[in-house]
Amino acid sequence: MPLFPSVLSRRARLLLSGALSCIAFLILGYHPYAEDGGIYLTALLQKLHPEWYPYSHDFAAAHLHHSGYIWLLSLIAKAVPASLEWLFLDVHIVSIFASLYATSEIAVRCFAKSAENICAITAVAIGMSLPVAGTALYIADPYVTARSLSTPLLLAALIAVLDKKWLRVAILVVITLLLHPLMALWGAFFLAATAIAQAHSRIRPLLGFVIAALVALALVRLFSPEENLLAQTLAHSRSYWYLANWEWYEWIGMLAPPALLMALHFRSPWTSTQASLTRAAVAIFMLSGAASLLLVHPTSTHLLLARMQPLRMMHFAYLVFLFLLGAKVGSFVENVRSLRILPIVAGFVIAGCALFLMQRSLYASSNHIELPNSPLRNPWEQAFIWIREHTPVDAIVAMDAHYISTPGEDAQSFRALAQRSCLPDYSKDGGVASVYRVLAPKWQRGEHAQQDLNQLNDVERLKQLHGTKASWILLPAASQTAFACLYQNNAVKVCRLPVSY
């Protein structure tokens, strides 16, 4: 007796996507002020409140220049009466649901069996927090960024490719390009590979596409300008840009998915649509790896292509890999007795629990789901909130340059939470400056002024901070200082710097 219905209706797909969105949300968690989420939120705050961040204006507004994402969110924020915090939470949840529903639409175009449909969508939902090899990207983030919108849009474009609705493909790619140019570019490579694989059953046209793409990227590198030592230093600090700098296990994360896809395909060949997605994913894995190895070198002085991060092509390929892997699992449970499905369910549960625990380890000192207006458990976040409530808008705060990687800080963004200016840090501001080169000198001055700030004495701190206009300093709770510290918890203390130093 069949365990699953023969057809998964639209209503069933909507219900399934909704239920799996809840599971994905619970696994991912929600940390609106962390990592890139804090950078995008700061940019939106700067857009809505131009008087904020007088010292950090350039870093706060960096993401306004090449993306319409912040402009779109600012229009929504002005039109909707809800608070910004609730708006971001809503966007986060809607983006998860939209991605999963788009995945279900792809599934019904690829698989005739509903078990394959269900398992394909389930695999994507559970695997949303999976890291994409060594790219510093995840399938989805526990916060809102431009990728929150670009991913479902590119999935909708993939649906249009499978339906051969080329005008719709072009419109969706253009919209994505306006919101997130980089992910739109690399997503378009996957769409092109899928279209070619769908039109030609032989491998030669797809190999031709890979070679042509490599030539185009080589021309980009050839005609890009040489850059100065500071730009090179910033680029080298982003190890995830360079395949040569990846750890061995990150290489496995790049090589294992295409190898597994090919093994599954040759053992039990898929239908034409499924095979097209498989071949397109393998081609993109090949292209991204070849482009990085041949054209993006840590020793190169031509940094434009490195800054474009061709390894990001794997983001969409990883998503399709999860989708196809889940579908293959689903093909094993069609028309079997209920007892036989228990190992499959157990496998999904174990995978979900493992990824949940991984998320908890990344944000161990913070609430797993940081809802708007809920009490914050992280002592660093508590200190940032105190600064927001007790310092003037023009306050400038100094911290150790590597504060964001301090154990227990959980990569929480100071600017997004404190809504105050701070000197540029090594990690996140370094990432911004590596893309927006005009900020590099300011980043270097700020980063040097805060280097090893926690280990210095007060005289050395004031000497190092001279000329930065910093008016407050954030130090570990155990630090020795004679500065007037007006707030302290078990992790950090907030101290006022002398008026003139």
Image (tube, grey):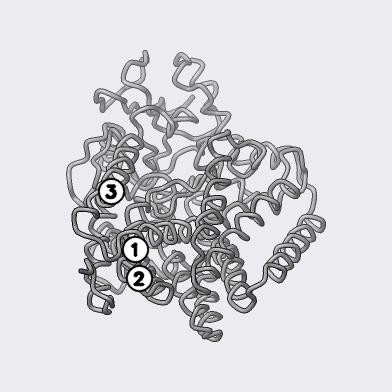
Vertical position of residue 349 compared to residue 197: above or below: above
Spatial CA distance of label 3 from label 2 is 20 Å
Q: Residue at x 46, y 16 (%)?
A: 455
Residue 431's image quarter? top right
Determine which residue is flagged by label 3. 27
Determine which residue is flagged by label 1. 121
Vertical position of residue 241 compared to residue 458: above or below: below
Q: Position of residue 33 (x, y in %)?
A: 34, 47
Spatial CA distance of label 2 from label 1 is 6 Å
Q: Are marks 3 and 2 in contact (CB under 8 Å)?
A: no
Ranked by sequence position, the earlier of labels 3 and 1 is: 3
Q: Residue at x 70, y 63 (%)?
A: 210
Tag shown at residue 137: none
Q: Residue at x 41, y 52 (%)?
A: 42
Q: Position of residue 323 (x, y in %)?
A: 42, 61
- Of badges 3 and 1, nearer the viewer stands 1
